Image: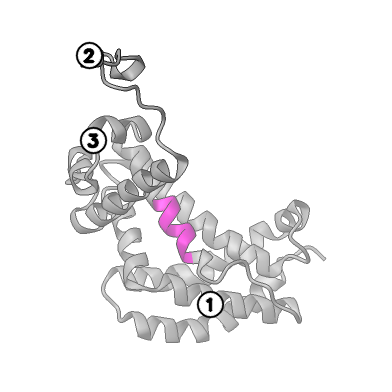
Amino acid sequence: MSPARPLTGGEEKGVRPRRGRPPAAAAGDVERRILDAASTLFLERGFARTTLDHVAETAQTGKTTLYGRFATKELLFAAVVARDTQSLTARIGAPQYDGPKQSRLEQAGIELADITLTKDSIALMRVTSADAETFPGLAQEGFRIGFSECARYIAHALADDDSDAALAAVSEAARRFVELALHPLYMHAFFGADLAGLRARARIAVPQVAPVVIEMLPK
């Protein structure tokens, strides 16, 4: 009978083979599952009633893995808001319009209304504001992320090019446009107004506000 082959390295008796880091694709899939689970739970239960343990269970991932990426529920919520808000505006990308600035602004404003006056988008806004008294920092961060993304979208329609200087020059006008044309519609949506009707109203509100905002642009 031939002698047994000696055990080496990870084959040594009682010792498991060492595992390296998971490939980047696998790590990205874990984070996607965590954010998907967190988004669903936050929208269904709200921030206060969702725990990191709930998220780990729903995402089918270990608590160590979850806490290693998001040490607190606030950080996880901010990541969910950032991802979901960016995915909304990414549906149609940065506006690429020709023609006068007012025409570009009106087109961008109506398209932004169409992608934000939706069930999922309004639900996310509600979650952000629902616990504002208990978690004021959370509400402020959620609002900052969402508002910044909307203003950025409008700024790209107003700017002469995509340079940082051109976008900065129109940033204040872009913020005012979102506040004047879209925020009143969002408030109606919070209280249950028909979203299709609000999107139709945006086609009236946006052209009314656009000339006012154009006057704010640097000459």
Q: Is residue 54 left or right of residue 217?
A: left
**Looking at the image, what colour scheme do you see?**
one colour
Q: Please give the residue where the numbered disc 1 appears in the rendered image.
A: 111
Q: Residues within 10 Å of mark 3 (few under 14, many from 20)?
A: few
Whether residue 104 appears in this view of the structure is yes
Residue 103, percent across and down?
A: 68, 82
What's the residue at 47%, 50% (across, down)? 144
Residue type beneath disc 3: Gly
Q: Any magenta on residue 85?
A: yes
What's the residue at 40%, 52% (across, down)? 81
Q: Residues within 10 Å of mark 2 (few under 14, many from 20)?
A: few
Q: Quadrant of residue 126?
A: bottom left
Q: Which mark is residue 81?
A: none
Q: Please give the residue where the numbered disc 3 appears in the rendered image.
A: 62
Looking at the rendered image, the disc whose residue lies closer to the viewer, 1 or 2, is: 2
What's the residue at 34%, 49% (across, down)? 35
